[in-house]
Image (spheres, rainbow, N blue to C red):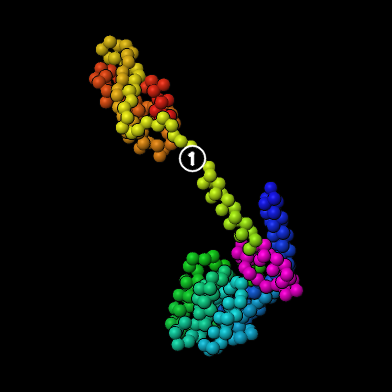
Amino acid sequence: MRRQKGNREVWARVGQARRITLQSALMDKRYQVFISSTYADLKEERRAVIQTVIELNSMPAGMELFPAADEAQLAFIKRVIDDCDYYLLIIGGRYRSVDETGISYTEQEYDYAAKRGLKVIALVHENPNEIPLGKSEKDAASREKLQKFRDKVCRGRLVKFWKNASELPGLVALSLSHAMNTYPAVGWVRADKVAKVDVLGEINDLRKRNQQLEGKVMEYKAALADLTPHPALEDLASLDEEITLKGKYWNRSHRTNETWSITTTWRKVFAHISPYLVKHPNADQVKEILESALFPESSYAAYGSSADLDDQNFQTVGVQ
Protein backbone atom coordinates (compact mmCIF):
# COMPACT_ATOMS: atom_id res chain seq x y z
CA MET A 1 0.00 0.00 0.00
CA ARG A 2 2.85 2.42 0.79
CA ARG A 3 4.43 1.82 -2.61
CA GLN A 4 1.10 2.38 -4.44
CA LYS A 5 0.53 5.62 -2.55
CA GLY A 6 4.03 6.78 -3.47
CA ASN A 7 3.36 6.02 -7.15
CA ARG A 8 0.15 8.05 -7.10
CA GLU A 9 1.96 11.00 -5.55
CA VAL A 10 4.69 10.85 -8.19
CA TRP A 11 2.20 10.74 -11.06
CA ALA A 12 0.17 13.57 -9.52
CA ARG A 13 3.28 15.77 -9.47
CA VAL A 14 4.13 14.75 -13.05
CA GLY A 15 0.64 15.66 -14.23
CA GLN A 16 0.76 19.02 -12.46
CA ALA A 17 4.16 19.85 -13.93
CA ARG A 18 3.05 18.83 -17.43
CA ARG A 19 -0.05 21.03 -17.21
CA ILE A 20 2.09 23.99 -16.20
CA THR A 21 4.48 23.33 -19.08
CA LEU A 22 1.73 22.89 -21.67
CA GLN A 23 -0.14 25.99 -20.56
CA SER A 24 3.05 28.01 -20.84
CA ALA A 25 4.15 26.51 -24.14
CA LEU A 26 0.78 26.96 -25.86
CA MET A 27 0.45 30.60 -24.81
CA ASP A 28 1.20 32.98 -27.72
CA LYS A 29 2.73 30.19 -29.77
CA ARG A 30 3.64 31.31 -33.29
CA TYR A 31 4.77 29.46 -36.38
CA GLN A 32 7.40 30.62 -38.84
CA VAL A 33 6.46 30.16 -42.49
CA PHE A 34 9.00 30.28 -45.30
CA ILE A 35 7.50 31.83 -48.46
CA SER A 36 9.25 30.68 -51.61
CA SER A 37 8.68 31.85 -55.18
CA THR A 38 10.20 33.77 -58.02
CA TYR A 39 10.35 37.42 -57.04
CA ALA A 40 10.12 39.98 -59.84
CA ASP A 41 6.97 38.50 -61.42
CA LEU A 42 5.15 37.70 -58.15
CA LYS A 43 5.64 40.84 -56.03
CA GLU A 44 1.91 41.51 -55.72
CA GLU A 45 1.17 37.87 -54.96
CA ARG A 46 3.89 37.71 -52.30
CA ARG A 47 2.56 40.84 -50.58
CA ALA A 48 -0.91 39.28 -50.38
CA VAL A 49 0.47 36.01 -48.99
CA ILE A 50 2.76 37.70 -46.46
CA GLN A 51 -0.11 39.83 -45.16
CA THR A 52 -2.27 36.72 -44.72
CA VAL A 53 0.49 34.88 -42.85
CA ILE A 54 0.86 37.83 -40.47
CA GLU A 55 -2.91 37.95 -39.89
CA LEU A 56 -2.73 34.24 -38.95
CA ASN A 57 -0.43 35.27 -36.07
CA SER A 58 2.54 33.65 -37.81
CA MET A 59 5.94 34.93 -38.87
CA PRO A 60 6.74 35.07 -42.61
CA ALA A 61 10.27 34.54 -43.86
CA GLY A 62 11.47 34.90 -47.44
CA MET A 63 13.64 36.59 -50.02
CA GLU A 64 12.45 40.10 -49.10
CA LEU A 65 15.04 39.94 -46.34
CA PHE A 66 17.74 38.00 -48.17
CA PRO A 67 17.36 37.62 -51.98
CA ALA A 68 18.94 34.41 -53.18
CA ALA A 69 21.48 35.59 -55.71
CA ASP A 70 24.42 33.30 -55.19
CA GLU A 71 25.41 30.02 -53.60
CA ALA A 72 26.50 31.61 -50.30
CA GLN A 73 23.12 33.28 -49.83
CA LEU A 74 21.36 30.01 -50.73
CA ALA A 75 23.27 28.31 -47.91
CA PHE A 76 22.09 31.06 -45.58
CA ILE A 77 18.49 30.58 -46.71
CA LYS A 78 18.76 26.86 -45.97
CA ARG A 79 19.63 27.74 -42.38
CA VAL A 80 16.52 29.95 -42.27
CA ILE A 81 14.42 27.07 -43.61
CA ASP A 82 15.81 24.91 -40.79
CA ASP A 83 14.21 27.34 -38.33
CA CYS A 84 10.82 27.40 -40.10
CA ASP A 85 7.78 25.28 -39.31
CA TYR A 86 6.02 25.32 -42.70
CA TYR A 87 7.05 25.90 -46.31
CA LEU A 88 4.70 27.85 -48.61
CA LEU A 89 5.51 27.69 -52.33
CA ILE A 90 4.00 29.95 -55.02
CA ILE A 91 4.53 28.97 -58.65
CA GLY A 92 3.66 31.40 -61.45
CA GLY A 93 5.02 31.69 -64.97
CA ARG A 94 8.74 32.04 -64.30
CA TYR A 95 11.32 29.38 -63.48
CA ARG A 96 13.89 31.97 -62.37
CA SER A 97 17.66 32.04 -62.72
CA VAL A 98 19.69 28.87 -62.30
CA ASP A 99 23.16 28.11 -60.96
CA GLU A 100 25.79 25.81 -62.40
CA THR A 101 23.57 22.78 -61.65
CA GLY A 102 20.89 24.10 -64.01
CA ILE A 103 18.30 24.10 -61.19
CA SER A 104 16.60 27.32 -60.07
CA TYR A 105 17.06 28.60 -56.53
CA THR A 106 13.31 28.25 -55.92
CA GLU A 107 13.40 24.57 -56.85
CA GLN A 108 16.48 24.04 -54.69
CA GLU A 109 14.67 25.67 -51.76
CA TYR A 110 11.69 23.37 -52.35
CA ASP A 111 13.88 20.25 -52.55
CA TYR A 112 15.64 21.19 -49.34
CA ALA A 113 12.38 21.87 -47.46
CA ALA A 114 10.91 18.54 -48.63
CA LYS A 115 14.09 16.74 -47.58
CA ARG A 116 13.89 18.36 -44.16
CA GLY A 117 10.35 17.03 -43.77
CA LEU A 118 8.61 20.41 -43.57
CA LYS A 119 4.91 20.42 -44.37
CA VAL A 120 4.69 21.92 -47.87
CA ILE A 121 1.77 24.11 -48.95
CA ALA A 122 1.90 24.52 -52.74
CA LEU A 123 -0.01 27.24 -54.62
CA VAL A 124 0.34 26.65 -58.37
CA HIS A 125 -0.98 28.90 -61.15
CA GLU A 126 -3.83 27.09 -62.86
CA ASN A 127 -2.89 28.02 -66.44
CA PRO A 128 0.61 29.41 -67.10
CA ASN A 129 -0.32 30.02 -70.76
CA GLU A 130 -2.68 32.79 -69.66
CA ILE A 131 0.02 34.68 -67.73
CA PRO A 132 1.15 37.90 -69.49
CA LEU A 133 4.31 37.54 -71.54
CA GLY A 134 6.22 39.91 -69.27
CA LYS A 135 5.73 37.52 -66.35
CA SER A 136 6.41 34.30 -68.28
CA GLU A 137 9.44 32.43 -69.51
CA LYS A 138 10.23 33.27 -73.11
CA ASP A 139 12.60 30.48 -74.15
CA ALA A 140 11.51 26.88 -74.58
CA ALA A 141 14.18 25.41 -72.26
CA SER A 142 13.03 27.49 -69.28
CA ARG A 143 9.37 26.71 -69.98
CA GLU A 144 10.22 23.00 -70.04
CA LYS A 145 12.03 23.26 -66.70
CA LEU A 146 9.08 25.15 -65.22
CA GLN A 147 6.68 22.44 -66.37
CA LYS A 148 8.85 19.68 -64.86
CA PHE A 149 9.03 21.62 -61.60
CA ARG A 150 5.22 22.00 -61.58
CA ASP A 151 4.81 18.27 -62.21
CA LYS A 152 7.19 17.41 -59.36
CA VAL A 153 5.40 19.67 -56.89
CA CYS A 154 1.93 18.42 -57.89
CA ARG A 155 2.96 14.78 -57.60
CA GLY A 156 2.01 13.10 -54.32
CA ARG A 157 0.63 16.10 -52.40
CA LEU A 158 -2.46 18.29 -52.21
CA VAL A 159 -2.02 21.42 -54.36
CA LYS A 160 -4.17 24.56 -54.55
CA PHE A 161 -4.50 26.29 -57.94
CA TRP A 162 -4.92 30.05 -58.40
CA LYS A 163 -5.44 32.52 -61.26
CA ASN A 164 -4.90 35.96 -59.74
CA ALA A 165 -3.44 37.50 -56.60
CA SER A 166 -6.86 38.18 -55.06
CA GLU A 167 -7.46 34.44 -54.66
CA LEU A 168 -4.27 33.78 -52.71
CA PRO A 169 -5.22 35.16 -49.23
CA GLY A 170 -8.21 32.82 -48.97
CA LEU A 171 -6.22 29.80 -50.20
CA VAL A 172 -3.36 30.56 -47.83
CA ALA A 173 -5.67 31.07 -44.85
CA LEU A 174 -7.48 27.75 -45.43
CA SER A 175 -4.42 25.68 -46.29
CA LEU A 176 -2.14 27.05 -43.59
CA SER A 177 -4.81 26.82 -40.87
CA HIS A 178 -5.49 23.21 -41.87
CA ALA A 179 -1.78 22.37 -41.76
CA MET A 180 -1.37 23.97 -38.33
CA ASN A 181 -4.33 22.05 -36.91
CA THR A 182 -3.54 18.72 -38.59
CA TYR A 183 0.26 18.81 -38.46
CA PRO A 184 1.19 21.06 -35.50
CA ALA A 185 4.87 21.97 -35.58
CA VAL A 186 7.29 23.08 -32.87
CA GLY A 187 6.64 26.80 -33.24
CA TRP A 188 8.02 29.73 -31.26
CA VAL A 189 7.05 31.22 -27.89
CA ARG A 190 8.28 34.23 -25.96
CA ALA A 191 11.05 33.45 -23.52
CA ASP A 192 9.03 34.79 -20.58
CA LYS A 193 6.18 32.39 -21.43
CA VAL A 194 8.25 29.22 -21.28
CA ALA A 195 8.20 27.07 -18.14
CA LYS A 196 10.79 28.08 -15.60
CA VAL A 197 14.00 26.10 -15.27
CA ASP A 198 13.07 24.75 -11.85
CA VAL A 199 9.79 23.32 -13.20
CA LEU A 200 11.60 21.60 -16.05
CA GLY A 201 14.17 20.27 -13.60
CA GLU A 202 11.41 18.86 -11.42
CA ILE A 203 9.82 17.16 -14.43
CA ASN A 204 13.14 15.55 -15.31
CA ASP A 205 13.61 14.34 -11.74
CA LEU A 206 10.10 12.88 -11.70
CA ARG A 207 10.74 11.15 -15.01
CA LYS A 208 13.86 9.49 -13.63
CA ARG A 209 12.00 8.50 -10.46
CA ASN A 210 9.19 7.00 -12.52
CA GLN A 211 11.68 4.92 -14.54
CA GLN A 212 13.18 3.60 -11.30
CA LEU A 213 9.73 2.66 -9.98
CA GLU A 214 8.82 0.92 -13.24
CA GLY A 215 12.03 -1.09 -12.99
CA LYS A 216 11.15 -2.14 -9.45
CA VAL A 217 7.66 -3.20 -10.55
CA MET A 218 9.13 -5.41 -13.28
CA GLU A 219 11.50 -7.01 -10.75
CA TYR A 220 8.62 -7.73 -8.36
CA LYS A 221 6.52 -9.24 -11.13
CA ALA A 222 9.38 -11.52 -12.19
CA ALA A 223 9.97 -12.63 -8.59
CA LEU A 224 6.25 -13.29 -8.11
CA ALA A 225 6.13 -15.40 -11.28
CA ASP A 226 8.98 -17.56 -9.98
CA LEU A 227 7.14 -18.15 -6.70
CA THR A 228 3.81 -19.07 -8.30
CA PRO A 229 3.54 -22.87 -8.83
CA HIS A 230 2.57 -23.95 -12.32
CA PRO A 231 -0.63 -26.01 -12.46
CA ALA A 232 -0.04 -29.70 -13.12
CA LEU A 233 -1.92 -31.48 -15.91
CA GLU A 234 -3.23 -34.62 -14.26
CA ASP A 235 -4.58 -37.69 -16.05
CA LEU A 236 -3.36 -36.44 -19.43
CA ALA A 237 -3.20 -39.31 -21.89
CA SER A 238 -0.11 -39.90 -23.99
CA LEU A 239 -0.38 -39.54 -27.76
CA ASP A 240 0.12 -43.26 -28.42
CA GLU A 241 -2.31 -44.40 -25.73
CA GLU A 242 -5.32 -46.21 -27.17
CA ILE A 243 -8.96 -45.25 -26.67
CA THR A 244 -12.16 -46.93 -27.77
CA LEU A 245 -14.84 -44.61 -29.13
CA LYS A 246 -18.38 -45.68 -29.98
CA GLY A 247 -21.68 -44.37 -31.16
CA LYS A 248 -24.79 -45.13 -33.21
CA TYR A 249 -25.13 -45.62 -36.98
CA TRP A 250 -27.89 -46.53 -39.45
CA ASN A 251 -27.64 -50.17 -40.65
CA ARG A 252 -28.89 -50.21 -44.21
CA SER A 253 -29.52 -53.94 -44.32
CA HIS A 254 -31.47 -54.22 -41.06
CA ARG A 255 -32.83 -50.67 -41.36
CA THR A 256 -32.18 -50.07 -37.67
CA ASN A 257 -29.90 -47.92 -35.52
CA GLU A 258 -27.06 -50.03 -34.21
CA THR A 259 -23.87 -49.51 -32.19
CA TRP A 260 -20.46 -49.00 -33.83
CA SER A 261 -17.04 -48.69 -32.20
CA ILE A 262 -13.40 -48.18 -33.08
CA THR A 263 -10.16 -48.46 -31.13
CA THR A 264 -7.67 -45.78 -32.08
CA THR A 265 -4.91 -43.64 -30.52
CA TRP A 266 -4.98 -40.08 -29.23
CA ARG A 267 -2.38 -39.22 -31.86
CA LYS A 268 -4.84 -40.14 -34.64
CA VAL A 269 -7.70 -38.31 -32.92
CA PHE A 270 -5.59 -35.19 -32.65
CA ALA A 271 -4.46 -35.56 -36.27
CA HIS A 272 -8.09 -35.51 -37.39
CA ILE A 273 -8.98 -32.41 -35.37
CA SER A 274 -5.83 -30.26 -35.42
CA PRO A 275 -6.05 -28.91 -39.02
CA TYR A 276 -9.38 -27.27 -38.16
CA LEU A 277 -8.44 -25.73 -34.80
CA VAL A 278 -6.97 -22.58 -36.39
CA LYS A 279 -10.51 -21.76 -37.57
CA HIS A 280 -11.86 -21.94 -33.98
CA PRO A 281 -14.67 -24.45 -34.69
CA ASN A 282 -17.48 -24.95 -32.17
CA ALA A 283 -18.16 -28.25 -30.39
CA ASP A 284 -20.74 -29.46 -32.91
CA GLN A 285 -18.36 -28.87 -35.80
CA VAL A 286 -15.54 -30.78 -34.07
CA LYS A 287 -17.91 -33.65 -33.35
CA GLU A 288 -18.93 -33.85 -37.02
CA ILE A 289 -15.26 -33.85 -38.04
CA LEU A 290 -14.53 -36.83 -35.76
CA GLU A 291 -17.62 -38.73 -36.90
CA SER A 292 -16.73 -38.23 -40.57
CA ALA A 293 -13.14 -39.34 -39.97
CA LEU A 294 -13.50 -42.23 -37.50
CA PHE A 295 -16.57 -44.10 -38.75
CA PRO A 296 -15.13 -44.79 -42.25
CA GLU A 297 -12.06 -46.32 -40.52
CA SER A 298 -14.24 -48.74 -38.52
CA SER A 299 -15.40 -52.17 -39.65
CA TYR A 300 -19.01 -50.99 -39.56
CA ALA A 301 -18.64 -48.50 -42.41
CA ALA A 302 -19.49 -51.18 -45.01
CA TYR A 303 -22.92 -51.81 -43.46
CA GLY A 304 -24.28 -48.38 -42.80
CA SER A 305 -24.06 -44.58 -42.67
CA SER A 306 -25.17 -41.53 -40.66
CA ALA A 307 -22.81 -42.32 -37.80
CA ASP A 308 -23.10 -40.48 -34.51
CA LEU A 309 -20.44 -40.28 -31.78
CA ASP A 310 -21.42 -40.99 -28.20
CA ASP A 311 -21.69 -37.72 -26.24
CA GLN A 312 -19.77 -39.06 -23.25
CA ASN A 313 -16.95 -40.19 -25.52
CA PHE A 314 -16.89 -36.76 -27.18
CA GLN A 315 -16.68 -35.02 -23.79
CA THR A 316 -13.67 -37.21 -22.96
CA VAL A 317 -12.01 -36.12 -26.20
CA GLY A 318 -12.72 -32.48 -25.36
CA VAL A 319 -11.11 -32.80 -21.92
CA GLN A 320 -7.98 -34.39 -23.37
| Residue 170 x %, y % | 65, 68
Instruction: Check the image and report above or below for 46 versus 277.
Output: below
Where on the picture, by quarter, is residue 91? bottom right
Q: Residue furthest front?
A: 227
Instruction: Check the image and report above or below for 87 versus 74.
Output: above
Front-most of residues 194 and 140: 194
Left or right of 178? Residue 240 is left
**Any part of residue 44 in sight:** yes
What element does badge 1 sit on? loop
At 34% from the left and 23% from the top, the residue drawn is: 245
| Residue 232 x %, y % | 46, 36
Residue type at mark 1: give it. Answer: His
Magenta stretch, main secondary structure, is helix
Where on the picture, by quarter, is residue 188? bottom right
Q: Which residues are the magenta region?
A: 179-207
| Residue 173 x %, y % | 66, 68
| Residue 146 x %, y % | 48, 78
Q: Which residue is mark 1?
A: 230
Does residue 296 show up magenta in the picture?
no
Front-most of residues 144 and 79: 79
